Each structure stands twice: as C-alpha cells, then as structure tokens.
Amino acid sequence: MNNELIEQYRELAKENPDDDLSQFALGQALINADRPAEAVPVLRHVTRINPKYTKAYILLGRALEADGDEEGAIEAWQLGYHASNKQGTLMNAQEAKQLLEARNAPLTSEVVELLGLDDDEAAESEEDANREPDEDEVRCIRSGRIGKRMRFDPFDDQIGAFIMERVSQESWEGWMEMSIKVINELRLDLGDHNHQALYEQHMRDYLKLPDSLFESDSDSDSDQS
C-alpha cells in the first residue's frame, strides 16, 4: 500500500516539479515508508523552491539523520529554526529548537548567517557601520545596526535596563508584533508559570539577550522551590 501511494505522489511530483506541496507530500511518504535516502533530495528541492516552507526543514533533518548524516540534519534544523521564527510559524520553531537542544547543537550556524535568513533589511551603510551611536541611538544587539534608543524601560529592572541600552526601538517593536504570534499560536496563558517561561524564552531568542542576564532570576526561582 505504501509503495502504491508513493508512486502516486511521485507521478504528481513529476507533473508539478515546482509545486512545493506535491514535492513535500512525496518526501513525507518516503520517510513514512522508511526510505530516508530517497526523501532527502525531494525535501531539499522543497526548500529550494520555497525557502519559507518551514516544515520541510524539520522533515529534511529527520531524513538526513535517519540516513546517517547528523551534521546535515543539524544544519537543516538550524535553517528551519530561523526560517520558522522569521515566518512566525512558532510550532515549527519550537520543534526545531527541541531537536537541536536534544543533540546539544547550537541554534545558529555560519550557513544560516551566510544565507541571511535572519534579516531581509538592506545592509547598514558604511558610514553607520563605522560610527558610534548618537545619544538618542543604540547599536542593537539583535540587528547589529544603529537604531533608535528605546523610549521607556519595559520591565523596570536589570533586564529592562539592558534592553534600554542594547536593543533598538525598531527591534522592540518587532518583538511586540512577534509576541502576539507567540501567544496566539502557542495558546499561551501568561498567568501560568510554565507558559510565562516559554514566552520569555521566545523573547530572549528573538532579541538575542544573553543568558547571563537571567541567571539571577533562575537562581531566585530555585531558592523559592
């Protein structure tokens, strides 16, 4: 039955070589049939014709790992993690992050940076790249660019003070938009401690806040428990 279904998907993929859905369906069927080596080139094709198809990166990583290519799998999940965050497909971002963390792999790589998945904005001008920020500006830790200084401290604590000094207004507004997607897509109840922690982790990842900034908070939580 699996072989028959695969051949149907294969015919459909041949008739529609640039249709990401047809190609993805074939790749998924091949993985389900325990044929990862055949699934790999199909799923790579999906990510080439539609780099925004974030689930394809997740599946590609699984196929590569099953085929014995652990480095390739990690790279696929890193690309998937960043593409998912960018597209706001947060369930896929969470899945990619869990896969990477389970293998003690970093969330980023040189490949991700070279492909520029983190940022579609035009490159910073040479003048801005070589000057110090003015009083009403900061060099943003997230973007690496000079941007407007925050107009207010969002938390009124050491984390808020750090954000005021190191995160631009533009990046903060970007997080405000993304935070709505985080709450809605992950169905978070911010009155729940675990949900609040997950929300904060997304904020940390999005703004590229250093882990050391949160160590005192985690220590105090441990003391209370």
Image (spheres, rainbow, N blue to C red):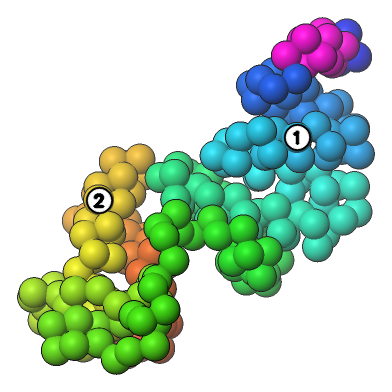
Identify which amino acid the numbered label 1 is placed on.
His
Q: Nearer the viewer, residue 134 or 68?
A: 134
Image quadrant containing the C terminus: bottom left
Side (left or right) of 26 relative to 91: right
Secondary element type, mark 1: helix
Instruction: Work out whether mark 1 precedes mark 2 in sequence or the reverse, and give the earlier one.
Output: 1
Q: CA distance from mark 1 to mark 2?
A: 31 Å
Mark 1 crowdedness (10 Å alpha carbons): few <14, some 14-19, many ≥20: some
Task: Quadrant for residue 59, please give it.
Answer: top right
Secondary element type, mark 2: helix
Query: Which mark is nearer the camera, 1 or 2?
Result: 1
54 shown above or below 10: below
Residue 14: in magenta span? yes
Side (left or right) of 213 relative to 159: right
Q: Specify the segment rendered in magenta.
A: 6-16
Task: Quadrant for residue 51, please give it.
Answer: top right
Give the farthest residue toward the left.
152
Identify which amino acid the numbered label 2 is placed on.
Glu
Name the residue located 66 percent from the left edge and 20 percent from the top edge: 19
Q: Nearer the viewer, residue 92 or 169?
A: 169
What x and y, as percent, mark residue 101? 62, 66
Q: Which residue is mark 1?
A: 45
Q: Which residue is mark 2?
A: 177
What x and y, as percent, mark residue 14? 82, 14
Give the farthest residue toward the front.
127
Can residue 40 be seen here? The reply is yes
Residue 129: in magenta span? no
Q: How many marks?
A: 2
